[in-house]
Image: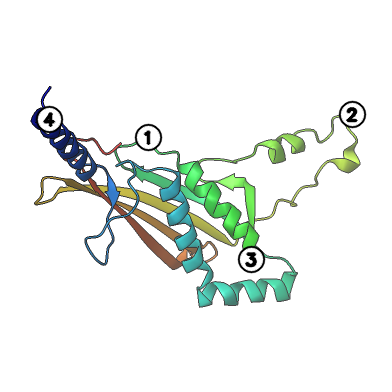
Amino acid sequence: MTRKSWISLALVGLMGMYTGCANQPHYIDPEKDGTSTPVTMGLDYEDFQRAAIKLVDSMLRSKYLDRMYRMKMKKEGKPLILMISDFVNDTTQRVDIDQLVKRIRISLLDSGKFIITTALRAGGAEDSATYELRKLRGNAEFKQSRIAKKGTIETPDLSLSGKIIQRVSKLSNGEQRVDYYFQMSLTDVSSGLAFWEGEEVVSKAGSGKSAPW
């Protein structure tokens, strides 16, 4: 092969590499048309992590929440009790909602302002052990002094609900843009009023031929 042929082959290879990089999925900076480290077009752990941290930070800055927490500590000497309500996946992906919720729960527990109840959740108890234990009342095989009494399950002060929404659009350069909206609401269950709501958007762009999942 001649020297000229080698140079032509090298140029073709470089052009192929450039085209491949251009089509690589990337984040979209909401402030400008910049990009960051390439990622998949679908949701991944980093997206959950980013959304969870920002939403929790926003929630903990709520003045109403801080006032409610201080009143609860002064009156009962313990943090707010939170139950997990409905979290809806309105995307084309099989998203593990519990992965997002778990990260949020850990952060809220670490803040010291919350205790999470597992005896109550939308659709039924998250941990059935609380109720299974109470079925042993009157069973002579078990030490009854260790069985929880009636009226001892704590009721929640707040409920946390959320939704993930996906929107896909075409860009002028032939790529496609995928926006994921992470939305959450914190509701005072005694009044049914949501006193905090947050939304975090994760936007990505990539090849128009790739599927966002």
- SS class of the residue under badge 1? loop
**Element marked by disc 2:** loop
SS category of the residue bearing label 3: loop
Location of residue 161 in the rendering, given as x and y in whole percent from the top left corner: 45, 54
Q: Residues within 10 Å of mark 1 (few under 14, many from 20)?
A: few
Which amino acid, mark 3?
A: Lys
Mark 4 / mark 1, whichever is N-terminal = 4
Say whether residue 31 is visible: yes
Instruction: Examine the rendering and report whether any part of residue 114 can be seen.
Output: no
Please determine whether, in this image, residue 15 is positioned above or below residue 139: below
| Quadrant of res 44 | top left
Q: Is residue 40 left or right of residue 72?
A: left
From the viewer's perspective, tell me whether residue 49 is left or right of residue 155.
left
Q: Secondary structure at mark 4?
A: helix
Disc 1 from disc 2: Cα separation? 46 Å
At which x and y percent is residue 206? 22, 44
Q: Are marks 4 and 1 in contact (CB under 8 Å)?
A: no
- What amino acid type should be assigned to the residue bearing mark 4? Arg
For badge 1, the amino acid type reads Arg
Task: Find disc 4 in the rendering and name its residue.
Answer: 3
Front tag of 1 and 2: 1
Residue 146: name its quadrant.
Answer: top right
Cα separation, mark 4 vs mark 1, equals 52 Å
